[in-house]
């Protein structure tokens, strides 16, 4: 299994990195859309859709995402509304995780949750890529942030984990693991903000706080997908990525972290008129 996971990473990561460095936004946004489409297909399946209804859900997610991306790129007000609403959604999702009824327990609720998860994430990564003066520094940072939070949380939880975070949803996650993940994000943000963006000390502090917040919210994205799979009674969201499960299994944390980080970036760091 480990060899299969490594092989998948070796096959997928270099072309993705090359695309981020070489393709213009007109190429990157549809590339992100392919991942969103695959994730929407898996989300539809986890929400009990099949056949034409499942394809229709994919089309709905892509259509909504396209309209909002075009609108957000044309209007900062729309961008703030979309990202602000997405950030609020993750607070709602946090409380819903621990409820025995609600959005995760009805088909309509799960389908609405998919729209609120996948569409803003696509908008967020698109805005980060287009608005990045050091393209693709912002996208790479968000990807590294999510990877650092996940990897450090696993290591810290394995070494020091004593207190379960959400045992009914994801038994392996611990409070100590989350703390370790946030610490890793803080260190990463400090290095990145100093070396890449060369922030002044006061600005660097705000940057680190934003990154740590996105790191914390990424945990909600991970738990949200875990809850969705538990309700559906499956282990993985799909089989598209050998050794890794489905696309949702790989981007669940990113779907939560990206809108929060992008909104914070627009509010506090983006100096464009």
Image (tube, helix red, strand yellow):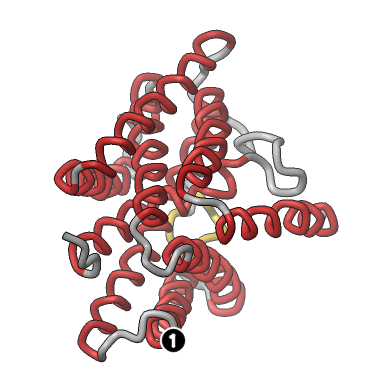
Residue at coordinates 25% horizontally, 56% vertically from top-left?
Answer: 263
Outermost residue toward the top in this view: 52
- Looking at this view, is 207 or 138 the one in front? 138
Residue 95 shown left or right of residue 4 in the figure: left
Q: Which residue is mark 1?
A: 195
- Looking at this view, is 80 or 145 the one in front? 80
Residue 17 shown left or right of residue 251 in the figure: right
Quarter of the rendering containing residue 240: top right
Which element type, helix, strand or loop, lies under badge 1?
helix
Q: Taking 204 as reference, is 257 above or below it?
A: above
Quarter the C terminus occupies = bottom left
Residue 104 image offset from top left, x and y in percent: 39, 31
Residue 2 shown left or right of residue 217 in the figure: right
Residue at coordinates 55% horizontally, 76% vertically from top-left?
Answer: 156
- Looking at this view, is 37 or 151 the one in front? 37
Quarter of the rendering containing residue 171: bottom right
């Amino acid at each position: 299994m480990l060899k299969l996971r490594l092989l998948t990473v070796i096959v997928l990561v270099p072309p993705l990195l090359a695309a981020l460095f070489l393709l213009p936004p007109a190429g990157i946004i549809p590339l992100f859309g392919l991942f969103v489409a695959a994730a929407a297909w898996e989300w539809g399946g986890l929400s009990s859709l099949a056949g034409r209804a499942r394809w229709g859900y994919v089309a709905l997610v892509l259509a909504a995402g396209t309209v909002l991306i075009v609108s957000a790129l044309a209007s900062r007000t729309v961008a703030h509304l979309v990202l602000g609403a997405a950030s609020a959604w993750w607070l709602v999702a946090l409380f819903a995780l621990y409820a025995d009824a609600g959005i995760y327990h009805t088909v309509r609720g799960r389908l609405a949750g998919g729209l609120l998860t996948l569409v803003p994430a696509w908008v967020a990564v698109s805005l980060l890529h287009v608005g990045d003066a050091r393209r693709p520094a912002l996208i790479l940072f968000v990807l590294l942030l999510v990877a650092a939070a996940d990897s450090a949380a696993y290591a810290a939880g394995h070494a020091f984990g004593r207190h379960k975070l959400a045992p009914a949803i994801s038994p392996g996650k611990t409070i100590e693991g989350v703390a370790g993940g946030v610490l890793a994000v803080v260190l990463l943000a400090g290095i990145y903000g100093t070396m890449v963006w060369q922030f002044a000390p006061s600005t660097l502090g705000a940057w680190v706080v934003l990154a740590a917040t996105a790191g914390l919210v990424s945990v909600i994205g991970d738990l949200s997908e875990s809850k969705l799979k538990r309700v559906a009674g499956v282990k993985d969201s799909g089989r598209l990525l050998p050794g890794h499960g489905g696309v949702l299994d790989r981007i669940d944390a990113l779907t939560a972290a990206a809108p929060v980080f992008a909104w914070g970036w627009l509010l506090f760091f983006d100096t464009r008129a």
